[in-house]
Image (cartoon, grey):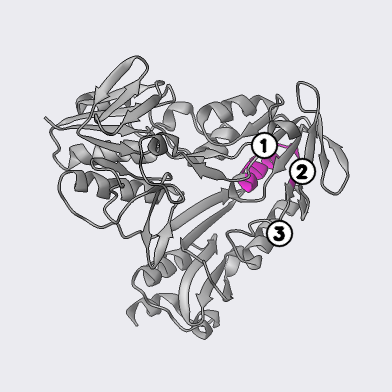
Amino acid sequence: MTHVVVVGAGQAGASLVAKLRNCGFEGDITLIGAEPCLPYQRPPLSKTYLLGETARDRLYLRPERFYADNNIALRLGEPVTEVNAGDQTVTVGDETIRYNELVFATGSSPRQLPANIGGALSGVHVVRNLSDIDGMSPSFVKDARVLIIGGGYIGLEAAAVAASKGLQVTLVEMADRILQRVAAPETSNYFRALHQRHGVNILEGVGLDCLLGSDRVTGARLSDGTKQDFDFVIVGVGIVPSTDLADRAGVALENGIKTDVYGATSVPHIWAAGDCASFPYGSGRIRLESVPNAIEQSGIVAENIMGGHKEYRAKPWFWSDQYDVKLQIAGLNTGYDRVISRAANGGATSHWYYLADRLLAVDAMNAPRDFMIAKRLIEAGKSPAPETIGNPKTDLKSLLKA
């Protein structure tokens, strides 16, 4: 009987094993996770879970009985230490498990600060898993001083939670502006103003020189030469795909675990899905770090393990919650050369990214209608003229019929 082993019990891994059973797969399934808890949602960690608004058990993607009822063997809190592609085995602790098909759903890991600038001090945190959040949450007390390093979405979400709980928040971004890598200046300006209204001190074009303290962090010296006292630090400087196991197993890498349009890697009987996997997109390759990608890509891989031979055609979309603002993003803005903005009542705003006359992406702030219409346009390959989008009298819904 075919045995599918999935390494990584995050969103991609949990979605994949559920999809296999939903598609009628009758073989054995083993889901292996390094964390000692059921597969759970990550997005709420830096938002409602950190705020104390979401209980731990509400994070779980499925109750424990689901895995038992569907004959899915869980190996939690036991990381895979080795994959032998020749023998088709994985090593977990002292046990060797044979597989017929293996899926890497190993996700990604947060970038850490180097130890020589204080990264190993107590009180320095990253935002990635449950233990990270549980470790930092006792520090979230009113008037505590927190330094957040990195002005991407993770850093901004952490800043929003901290400010909402009454902390004194300083955020440093070494680039010229927050969100510089992922968004237009218009979106950066929107979120800078939002955070400043909530009392966050945003320092752009300023990096970290080093953290101060002997055993526990007590402050920081910044690249502009200033020294400030802090009670704790949150590092949000990006993530990297978790590829070490795949690399040691001889699987080809390219900005992650390299897969084809079917999710297969360079090694027979080994697949990859989720944050760790890069795949063909347009004329190049991409790797998407998002829940929708993890679910959709892992679903395709599950079907292909069963002989489906289906190509994965990504439809990128993302979201971020900060204070009372929901940002929804459709498409990828890479290569844009102009941005068209639309404003609506109640502060709703959307920024539409174009390359010449081709619509690439949209950032929608509290504008779900704009987001949904833009998403459908992008997925259909439709590009309304920029002048049409910029006209406040344009009925966006009518563009779907054009």
Query: Could you tell me which secondary element the residue under label 1 belongs to?
Result: loop
Looking at the picture, does residue 55 appear above or below residue 385?
above
- In the figure, is residue 302 to the left or right of 205? left
Mark 1 — residue?
113
Nearer-N-terminus badge (2/1): 1
Query: Could you tell me which secondary element the residue under label 2 belongs to?
Result: strand
Give the residues in magenta: 155-171
- In the figure, is residue 325 to the left or right of 224? left
Disc 2 marks a residue whose amino acid type is: Leu
Q: Which residue is drawn at the image coordinates 67% and 47% (left, top)?
A: 150
Task: Where is residue 362? Give x, y as percent.
Answer: 50, 67
Disc 1 marks a residue whose amino acid type is: Leu
User: Which label was assigned to residue 208?
Assistant: 2
Query: Could you tell me which secondary element the residue under label 3 belongs to?
Result: loop
Q: Which residue is drawn at the image coordinates 82% and 44% (left, top)?
A: 222
Q: Tell whether label 1 touches label 2 (CB within 8 Å).
A: yes
- In the figure, is residue 318 to the left or right of 47? left
- In the figure, is residue 376 to the left or right of 389? left
Nearer-N-terminus badge (2/3): 3
Mark 3 — residue?
177
Q: Which residue is drawn at the image coordinates 31% and 60% (left, top)?
A: 313
Q: Is residue 118 visible?
A: no
Q: Tell whether label 3 touches label 2 (CB within 8 Å).
A: no
Question: Seen from this angle, which residue lies furthest right?
Answer: 226
